[in-house]
Amino acid sequence: MPGIGSNTADCRTRPTSSGWHAPVAEPRPLVAIQTAVTRITRRSHRLGPDSLRISAAQALRAHTLEGAVSLGREAEFGSLEVGKRADFVVLGADPLVVAGEEIASVPVLETWVDGERRYAGERPEGEHREGLSSI
């Protein structure tokens, strides 16, 4: 009997969440998203055939909304909507636009949890984001 995910078409049409095995492994969502897109690990190991690659949009959704769906908590978090927890990051580049091999190197500029900024990294010289300069 075939195992779960043995049919590539089945994997691409059914909701799939992605994550990590904390505390065994350090959570690195952008690394995991890049790996799902390229099928190459951070140690340069190839994970199966290229037919198992997914788009950056699919990988991002697997790390956000589909993770919440798998927990049955999509009404609380997983996407930015009125009434949901405001947990999100501000990135230095769009992971849906950069090359798949560059997703893990996209800088995290800010992290917000429950609507409060918990982390503010350094912005590149001269960068100004309208509406965020006074935060």
Image (spheres, grey):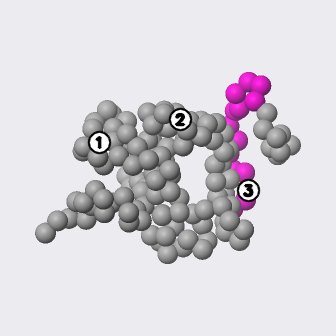
Residue drawn where x is 51% and y is 67% of the image: 68
Which residue is under mark 3?
116
Examine the image and state in which quarter residue 125 appears. Answer: top right
Residue that lies at the very extreme toward the right in this rendered image = 134
**Magenta: main secondary structure:** loop
The image position of residue 24, as x and y in percent, is 37, 52
Q: Which residues are magenta?
A: 114-127
Q: Quadrant of residue 14?
A: bottom left
| Few, some or many residues within 10 Å of mark 3 (<14, 14–19, 20+) | few
Q: Tag 3 or tag 2, which sits nearer the N-term?
A: 2
Distance of mark 1 from mark 3, alpha carbons? 40 Å
Residue tagged 2:
98
Q: Earlier in the sequence, mark 1 or mark 2?
A: 1
| Residue 31 on the magenta segment | no
CA distance separating discs 1 and 2: 19 Å
The residue singled out by tag 1 in the image is 50
Name the amino acid, label 3.
Glu
Tell me if I can see residue 90 in this picture: yes
Which residue is outermost to the top? 125
